[in-house]
Image (cartoon, rainbow, N blue to C red):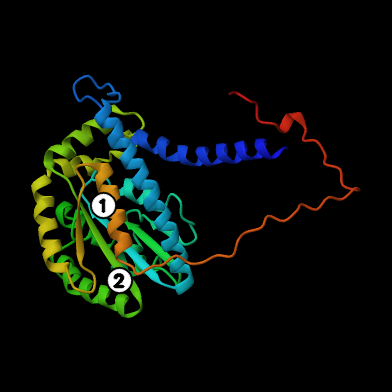
Amino acid sequence: MDKEELVKRVHRELADSYDEEMELELEDRTVDPVTGEFSSAHGEEEKEYRRLYFRELFRLQGELVKLQDWVVQTGHKVVIVFEGRDAAGKGGVIKRITQRLNPRVARVAALPAPNDRERTQWYFQRYVSHLPAAGEIVLFDRSWYNRAGVERVMGFCSDEQYEEFFRSVPEFERMLTRAGIQVIKYWFSITDEEQHLRFLSRIHDPLKQWKLSPMDLESRRRWEEYTKAKEVMLERTHIPEAPWWVVQAVDKKKARLNCIQHLLQQMPYAEVPHAPIQLPERERHEDYERHPVPDSMIVPEYY
């Protein structure tokens, strides 16, 4: 393969890697709540907005890679909590944060509902096993704050358990920070109208319907109860060691960029110098002959 062809193939590989982000943009398709049809792209203003979004997103993701290198080098430990209403966009920003990172360094903890055994444990016990070791970042897609939100509103915990949570959680998070774990907490805020539209979009989009659980639908009915629970939670758990940060998330793209930019500002990271990487020559042995793969094992080329 000559040098020119090699350069073309490397460029093609880079373009393919960025196409992944374009595929994720399917999540942002807008559905007309009346016709159930997808709206297509908008005017020049919208196209320019998307160009700005992608330019900034790729720049910020480059900074996240630098942050990752710094975390590994320094042994820093980070917990990032993502909370917010259903359909607020937490999953979208988590995907963009972790998209270019090493999953052994930056991993997501998205715990299911507790089983019968876990319900009898100390409340924080099942979360402790997911905490980071040195050089790790853990992103909690919902967290121990379930007790202050869904468990409170849906009646899954008693008044005593609810009050004990508020007595315990500040001390729990102070204990984490004393152990050298940085705790960053984000609440994604959307309006009543915006959640209504996003739920309609999920109903009409077959690629999103799996996101609508019976609990999500019930949360729509209990909007005001969730609002009250959120206000109490922010007031009682906003501590200097682990403060809450509210992300305005009506505009998904702006919310992602703002959250990532803010996250980068929370740590004094610096670019870690790396020695130039040299690709070694492949060894070749005259006595080696590659054996053909049987046709019966080949995946048919449908495309």
Residue furthest to the bottom: 178
Q: Residue at x 41, y 40 (%)?
A: 21
Q: How many marks?
A: 2
Cα–Cα gap, marks 1 and 2: 35 Å
Q: Earlier in the sequence, mark 1 or mark 2?
A: 2
Q: Position of residue 281 (x, y in %)?
A: 75, 53
Q: Residue at x 82, y 41 (%)?
A: 290
**240, above or below 118, in the image:** below
For the C terminus, give its image quadrant: top right
Q: Position of residue 48 (x, y in %)?
A: 29, 34
Mark 2 highlights which residue?
122
For the N terminus, give its image quadrant: top right
Mark 1 highlights which residue?
258
**The disc labelled 2 sits on which kind of residue?**
Trp
| Local SS, label 1 | helix
Q: Position of residue 280 (x, y in %)?
A: 72, 56
Q: Nearer the viewer, residue 122 or 239?
A: 239
Residue furthest to the top: 35
Camera sees residue 90: yes
Q: Nearer the viewer, residue 118 or 301?
A: 301
Q: Are marks 1 and 2 in contact (CB under 8 Å)?
A: no
Q: Position of residue 134 (x, y in %)?
A: 45, 73
